[in-house]
Image: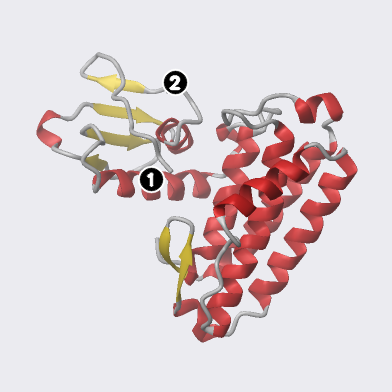
Amino acid sequence: MAMDPLLLTGEVDDATARLLRTAAGLDPADLAAPSLLPGWSRGHVLAHLARNADGFVNLLASAGTGRPIPMYASAAARTADISAGASRPTEEHLDDLRRSADRFAEAVAAMPVQAWAATVETRRGPWPAALLVWGRLRELEIHHVDLAAGYRPADWSTHFGQRLLHEVAGGFAGRDDAPPMVLRFDGSSHELVIGDRERAPVVAGSAADLAAWLTGRDTGGTLTVTPDGQLPRPPEWI
């Protein structure tokens, strides 16, 4: 998973542009309609993505200055900000998404080289600063799917799908609640093993389809299981 974070900035820009194109086509009724996330409308997802960019700006500032700056002021403040922004008109969502994306890009560009080696405190615990650009890309691509507005895991790049799959599978491999399974994805010369290989079924498909299934964004209908049987039930991701 190690990678120069600056190599991902172009992918973040492209993912942002795709998201903006989708958001620009949503009218008030579309924005108020449910997303794939329980209890959230599409407007909630867009508001979250804008505030998430600002949260990553805070983490970049923490890494750059060495000061303990939280991603969000508090869990309650995060929820309140998302709720407050969810019902805005399309143009306000677009303006917020653009401005917050610009702030993120500026914060990445301003990072001292040595600061990428820092560790920052996210909502879910410590994280290497070097993964913050990847984290933003992951948010954009997965939540774009969550809009349920035509963008699907099949639209993810091969590189993104494979990296997400490796990350999720690696996380599940260390969890007691993950069922054993062997993952094989198209074009791969190796397997990803979760749990005890001896009693693990082989689940095969594209990297994007496997990652979407493991993250709860797809039912796994295109995947195959060997020996024949039902798909394992992955635990909740994050």
Could you say which is closer to the camera, residue 102 or residue 57? Answer: 57
Name the residue type under label 1.
Val
Q: Kindly report which numbered mark, 2 or 1, lies closer to the viewer in this rendering.
A: 1
Q: Residue at x 68, y 54 (%)?
A: 51
Q: Which residue is drawn at 83% across and 47% down?
A: 94
Q: Where is residue 105 in the image (x, y as percent from the top left)?
A: 70, 67
Horizontally, residue 112 falls left or right of residue 105, namely: left
Residue holding disc 2: 222
Q: Where is residue 90 in the image (x, y as percent from the top left)?
A: 86, 39
* Label 1: how many Cα within 10 Å (few below 14, some 14–19, many 20+): some
Q: Is residue 6 visible?
A: no
Secondary structure, mark 1, is helix
Q: Does label 2 or label 1 sit earlier along the sequence?
A: 1
Horizontally, residue 164 falls left or right of residue 56, namely: left
Q: Which residue is drawn at 57% across and 44% down?
A: 157
Quadrant, the C terminus: top left
Disc on res. 206: none
Q: What's the distance in space between the residues labelled 2 and 1, CA to CA? A: 19 Å
Q: Which colour scheme is used?
A: secondary structure
Q: Which of the 4 image quarters holds residue 165?
A: top left
Q: Position of residue 150 (x, y in %)?
A: 69, 28
* Label 2: how many Cα within 10 Å (few below 14, some 14–19, many 20+): few
Residue holding disc 1: 168
Q: Is residue 73 above or below residue 171?
A: below
Q: Residue at x 56, y 73 (%)?
A: 69
Q: Which of the 4 image quarters holds residue 99?
A: bottom right
Q: Can residue 68 be seen in this view?
A: yes
Could you say which is closer to the camera, residue 147 or residue 89? Answer: 89
Q: Which residue in the rendered view is the most extreme toward the left?
A: 198
Secondary structure, mark 2, is loop
